[in-house]
Amino acid sequence: MNPPTPGEQFRYFHKQQNQILDTIQQLVEIESPSDIKAAVDRLGTVLASRFGELGGKVQVHRAEEFGNHLEVRFGRNHFHDAKSILLLGHMDTVYPIGTISKMPFRVAKGRVWGPGVLDMKAGIALMLHVIETMLVGSGGRLPRAVTIFLVSDEEVGSLSSRAITEKLARDSAAVLVLEPAHGQAVKTSRKGVGHYQLCIKGKASHSGLDFEKGQSAVLELAHQILQISKLTDLQRGITLNVGKITGGTRVNVVPAEARASIDVRIARKKDAQEIERRLHGLKPQNPNCKIEITGGINRPPMERTAGVAALYAKATEIARALGWQLEEAAVGGGSDGNFTAALGIPTLDGLGAVGEGAHADHESVLISELPRRAALLAGLIAMI
Ligand SMILES: [Zn+2]
């Protein structure tokens, strides 16, 4: 039996659309905010049994602070030597428990709505249905070994899952990330992300009686913010955003302390050191104030390496067979694909659902795009 063409896959997934929507509903209605372990674990248990029913070998990686991470392997016994393909995603969302009552799962205007539907429960549903379809179409055997890894803490920096993601990536020929598409495009590069905290210590005094004895930490912070903003270099894809400041106690007190939180984005790994060095090299303008900077680059950038470009080329070939011109995008946001790409493992991101409003109350997925995304993923698994 010849493997199905992308067009045949597409027609099949088109007929399956309602089943895919049922799965999306099941996943959306189990709320899973990153900071509630029991909630994410509930979703993990359901997914473990769904993937288990398909014959996947499920391994639960226990995490203490966050939900457990879920690894599922298919086809290990058939292809022991060959490296597998890693499908990567996350189960957690940014929405607190109870959001579902304000923005319930619904189907309207050709879209499916609900908390986390785009980022990225529809992506997980695509994984499930693509694996199921490929197994059915080939007598219970995938064309190659596939590992699925679903983490519980992506929206809060992936601290507890990163090491496992990296280990699985090292054993993989390629990593396909089912995060939302950018428009309809896949993501071939993502900026690296860092967070820093700046703390300034000055000296408090009465602003009327002892003004001269005070050393204003707030004034010093104002100077520092201007210095930090000068590090932004849009041409090189480097941005620094002082997104939050606090300082002072009362209007009639010269403030002894002030703080700022800084979000850093870099397009190239080699810029990380320079930004790090320059932030640590900040000098107080007022020598009587002390400044301290903590933090670092959390996600290295996902750069468009030759391996990434080759994966994208394969994806465009499959898309072309579906009569579709698949674009690529470079984005400023990070994902777990940043970790795998930084290890040099070919990574293609944004293979998940098409929609809008991630992390917002109009978060939704375009239903008509689901069959095409599923056919693209199935094609990639067969072709890589
Ligand atoms: Zn996401």
Image (spheres, grey):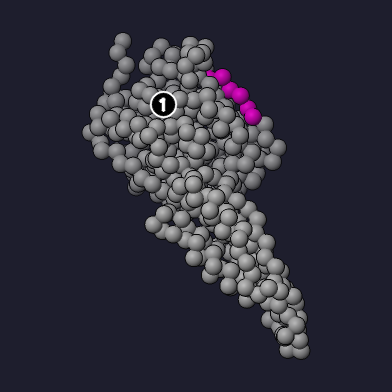
| Residue identified by numbered label 1 | 130
Residue at image coords 28%, 22%? 5
**Is 253 left or right of 237, judged from the image as shown?**
right
Mainly helix, strand or loop, the magenta region? strand
Q: Position of residue 164 (x, y in %)?
A: 60, 31
Residue at image coords 57%, 36%? 151
Indicate whether residue 13 is drawn in magenta: no
Task: Relative to 129, say whether 152 is above or below.
Answer: below
Task: Relative to 380, say whether 221 is above or below.
Answer: below
Q: Position of residue 308 (x, y in %)?
A: 39, 35
Q: Nearer the viewer, residue 156 or 332?
A: 332
Indicate whether residue 58 is drawn in magenta: yes
Q: Amino acid at mark 1?
A: Val
Query: Element type at marker 1?
Result: helix
Q: Extreme left residue here?
A: 323
Residue at image coords 40%, 37%? 305
Image quarter (top left, top right, bottom left or bottom right) of the C terminus: top left
**Span of residues in magenta:** 56-61
Task: Relative to 356, say whether 175 is above or below.
Answer: above
Q: Quadrant of residue 242?
A: bottom right
Image quarter (top left, top right, bottom left or bottom right) of the N terminus: top left
Residue at image coords 30%, 19%? 4
Q: Nearer the viewer, residue 95 or 307?
A: 307
Q: Position of residue 373 (x, y in %)?
A: 36, 34
Q: Nearer the viewer, residue 212 or 328?
A: 212
Q: Position of residue 216 (x, y in %)?
A: 68, 77
**Is 131 left or right of 48, judged from the image as shown?**
left
Q: Quadrant of residue 110?
A: top left
